[in-house]
Amino acid sequence: MSAKVVVSTENLPYEDWLEYRKTGIGGSDASVVCGINRYKTPIELWLEKTNQLVPQEAGESAYWGSTLEPIVREEFTRRTGAKVQCVKQLLQSEEHPFMLANLDGVCAVPEFGDCVFEAKTASAFKANEWEDAIPDEYMLQIQHYMAVTGFKATYIAVLIGGNTFRWKLVERDEELIAMLIELESRFWEYVKNGTTPPVDGSEACAKYLSEKYSESVAKPTVELPFEAEKLLKDYSAACEKLSAITKEKQLAENKLKQLLGEHEIGTFGGNIVSWKSVSQERLDTKTLKSEHPTLYKKYANTTTYRRFSVKSAE
């Protein structure tokens, strides 16, 4: 193995492990950097690495993935005869120090020697993603691991829906690894320099911009650069699509409400449609301000935010 050991992860507190993760790019970060992760965007990852966003706690899927990892590992050995050695260490690439790896294990393959072992669990709804290949985010993850370790192959095993077990041998892809190194190196420059990466459409990015430019300044109107032309067209087209989709959604909702009538709950197939009466108590601020102005002023809060809009100058 060509990687060096950063720290032993055996008995390492979770909080300390999170801090070590901020020192580089891990395997699960690879798909985020490449912009194909379904749950996190590059700017969210950048905010985490630069201590501007607290990493989300592991959810149920991650919990069960970790809990079932030993079972997946043992079943892989039982079916293939290949023993897996656990690797309780955070590894770092010698050549590219920003690349880190937390391996599930290492096993030997006659034609390749030592190789990465990666254990996964998947919902039954994602079984089709494992039919003839593996999901793209996991392909990037294991190629990242091979870049760090120098290994030539990876065995990836998955338990699907709790009752289907599969495993695949994936060889090292030099072209894909070269692309990963380039993209991760570019991303890590943003982290090192504290420079914001290209903005994306995530809520995290919107929140970041709102906090960074929290107050507008009364300056002369600014002439936007040429790139604004395409962005304005994109914004207008998206608004039109959103309006059409919103109307379609409202139409379907209205028709379902008509079918329910006075009933609270309706079912069809595996769907449950609910339209329940909900009672809420709301403060009548208008009356309070009129009849008890001093009390209203004492407890009223003033909030400031920037309202975004686009309209024609004509």
Image (cartoon, rainbow, N blue to C red):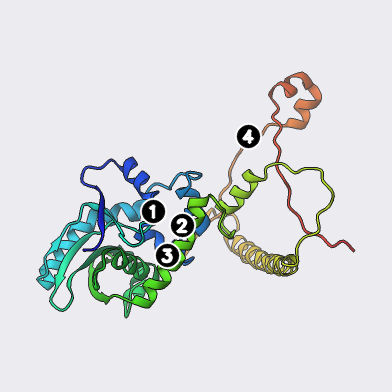
Q: Nearer the viewer, mark 3 or mark 4?
A: 3
Q: Nearer the viewer, mark 3 or mark 2?
A: 2
Q: Is residue 77 above or below residue 212?
A: below
Q: Nearer the viewer, mark 4 or mark 2?
A: 2
Looking at the rendered structure, the secondary structure element under dot 4 is loop
Q: Position of residue 208 (x, y in %)?
A: 59, 48
Q: Residue furthest right?
A: 314
User: Which amino acid type is marked by label 4?
Assistant: Glu
Mark 2 and mark 1 residues within 8 Å of each other at the beta carbon: yes
Q: Residue 188: which disc?
A: 2
Q: Residue 281: which disc?
A: 4
Q: Position of residue 128 (x, y in %)?
A: 35, 75
> For this view, does 314 lie left or right of residue 194?
right
User: Which amino acid type is marked by label 1?
Assistant: Gly
Mark 4 and mark 1 residues within 8 Å of each other at the beta carbon: no
Give the CA distance from mark 4 to mark 1: 49 Å
Q: Quadrant of the C terminus?
A: bottom right
Name which quarter of the figure residue 233 lies in.
Answer: bottom right
User: Which amino acid type is marked by label 2?
Assistant: Trp
The residue positioned 66% from the left and 66% from the top of the image is 251
Mark 3 and mark 2 residues within 8 Å of each other at the beta carbon: no
Name which quarter of the figure residue 28 lies in.
Answer: bottom left
